[in-house]
Amino acid sequence: MKRFLTPADLGDLRKALEDAKSVKNNPYADQALGRNKTLLLIFFNSSLRTRLSSQRAGFNLGMNVIVLDINNDGWKLETEFGVVMDGDKPEHIREAVPVMGQYCDIIGVRSFARFESKEDDYSEKILNQFIELSGKPVISLESATRHPLQAFADLITIEEYKTKPRPKVVLTWAPHPRALPQAVPNSFVEWMKIADVDLVVTHPEGYDLAPEFMEGVTYEPNQQKAFEGADFIYAKNWASFNQYGQILSKDRSWTVDEAKMALTNNAKFMHCLPVRRNMIVTDGVIESPNSIVVQEAANRVVSAQVVLKRMLQTIAEAYD
Ligand code: SN0
């Protein structure tokens, strides 16, 4: 595997879920695979789970791990082409990325949507520089349009907690004080569409995801109706795609609360975290026994480890 951005990069999803089980049951089985291999994690944005779980996954595989918070510890990077670099950015991404590639065997990068331009974000301007110029396998640690390690961990979690072969999974928009990227909901629907689940998406008017993600998805405008009979409630805020990056609503009648959870089939509550309490979800719901947000976060190690293991296998095969 040379890159990890979409579920297609994993191939057969059933097989990937089997790999996840075996990694979880036996996390140190492949220590030899990562020996003397270096994982470099580059962060353009904040992180708690992604940083720690990716490090832990690398250690479990016997790898060395280097983390760089590029905004605070590196040179500020110029990402525009053809500019006269007489401002505050001393280094160009076109030198920085191939240099980073010299110091590692696998590279992970976090670069959120910047909301300056829909075209720049949806063409994955930053992530694609790493794919094009690093010369190394690249893992998205949440790029402008996707968060695949999160969605894979979400699927692993749903597999673990489901009580029927094809559970009803509801992705609900919820209010937030800031404009957040579409990466998490984009990946969530992208993965759930091809999983053994019935996916329903509910959000206020104007919050449709990009057409390529919404295509084939069941949309229910009425949140309470969407919740009826649900086995999993997955809450997330995102900013508008059509009115790109805009906040169209902060309507707290969309907050996930106990009354709405009572409409479900005793649904489990999920969120990628960090979560704003009493905006996205009430204290009561997130602290209830049905909340599996911590177990979901724990599976971030598993999803990262499956991906790293596959990349290490590809590297090993190249030397056979
Ligand atoms: C990010 C997002 O894409 O929504 C990362 C989620 C894994 N979330 C935030 O930036 C939340 C920041 C906030 O102010 O609550």
Image (spheres, helix red, strand yellow):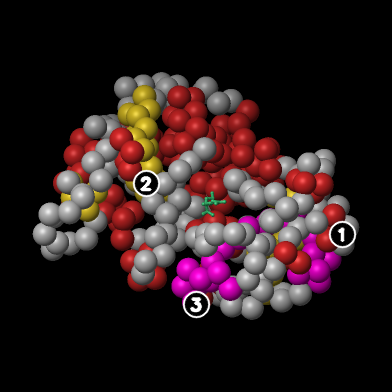
In x, y percent, where is residue 320?
28, 32
Is 242 placed left or right of 120 in the picture?
right
- Mark 2 and mark 3: span between their CA atoms? 25 Å
Residue shown at the point (69%, 56%) measured from the top left: 279
Mark 3: secondary structure = loop
Residue shown at the point (32%, 22%) measured from the top left: 36
Mark 1: secondary structure = helix
Q: Nearer the viewer, residue 317 or 311?
A: 311
Find the magenta span and give its range: 223-248
- Mark 1 and mark 3: span between their CA atoms? 31 Å
Crowd around label 1: few <14 · some 14–19 · many ≥20 (10 Å): few
Pointer 3 residue: 242
Pointer 2 residue: 44
Residue 231 shown in magenta: yes
Is 30 placed left or right of 236 in the picture?
left
The answer, for residue 38, to whether it is visible in the render is yes
Is 195 placed left or right of 78 in the picture?
right
Q: Which mark is residue 259?
A: 1
- First in residue order: circle 2 vs circle 3: 2
Is the residue indicated by label 1 positioned so its CB lies within 8 Å of ligand 1?
no
